[in-house]
Amino acid sequence: MKSLASFWSKTYVAIAAGPEAAQAMARLHEEDFIRPWTDGEFVQLLKQDTVFAFVACQEGKGVTSPAGFVLARLAAGEAEILTIAVARSVRRRGIGRLLMDAVMRKLHADRAESLFLEVDETNAPAIALYRRFGFRKVGERKAYYDAGDGSRNSAIVMRADFR
């Protein structure tokens, strides 16, 4: 698969990743989440047959220093984004779109019927990205995310259908 995102003369590609990328994924996850997942948790997930990941890396570089990643699961025709993160230093430059495109292409090839995800209600850029990929709101989980300041944000549940 050759999905590309380019900026500042750097070309990024989405590469399928396994447990070897767990430590780098955990580092990126820690930038974005109040309760980050450990590299051990990523390894355990990536060892499951139904779980897959893509990392966005500079072309020609390995999976150990990605600009972002997405972790997803596919079972019985339904898929879900488990988590996605993009390094703060490269946000708003197409990395999230690159990763979502890689997931969507894989799921189309695997004949998935739908893809679910949850997103913090305050994450407007992510919600806009998901809508561009055909996601629509199908539910809400009130006070689901810890906002880090004592308050809680709702999770918006979104779905894209492939058939």
Image (cartoon, rainbow, N blue to C red):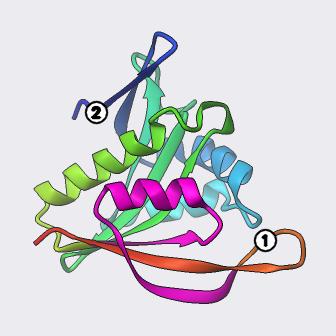
Region rendered in magenta: 115-144
- Image quadrant containing the N terminus: top left
Q: Is residue 88 left or right of residue 80?
A: right
| Residue 129 pos. (x, y %) | 43, 53
- Image quadrant containing the C terminus: bottom left
Residue type, numbered disc 2: Ser
The residue positioned 65% from the left and 52% from the top of the image is 29
Numbered-mark total: 2
Residue 121 visible in the current orientation: yes
Please tell me in which quadrant of the rendered image residue 161 appears: bottom left
Dot 1 falls on a residue whose secondary structure is loop
The residue to which callout 1 is attached is 147
Note whether 128 is above or below 120 in the view shown.
above
> Of label 2 and label 1, which has the lower sequence position?
2
The residue positioned 71% from the left and 60% from the top of the image is 33
Dot 2 falls on a residue whose secondary structure is loop
Tag 2 and tag 1, C-beta contact below 8 Å: no
| Residue 111 pos. (x, y %) | 11, 65
Q: Is residue 62 left or right of residue 98?
A: right
The residue to which callout 2 is attached is 3
Residue type, numbered disc 1: Ala
Please tell me in which quadrant of the rendered image residue 27 appears: top right
Assess disc 1: are there few (<14), some (14-19) or many (≥20) residues with their C-alpha within 10 Å of its C-alpha.
Answer: some
Foreground of the two, 69 or 104: 104
Residue 100 is a magenta residue: no
| Residue 53 pos. (x, y %) | 39, 51
The residue positioned 67% from the left and 31% from the top of the image is 89
| Residue 21 pos. (x, y %) | 51, 42
Residue 128 is a magenta residue: yes
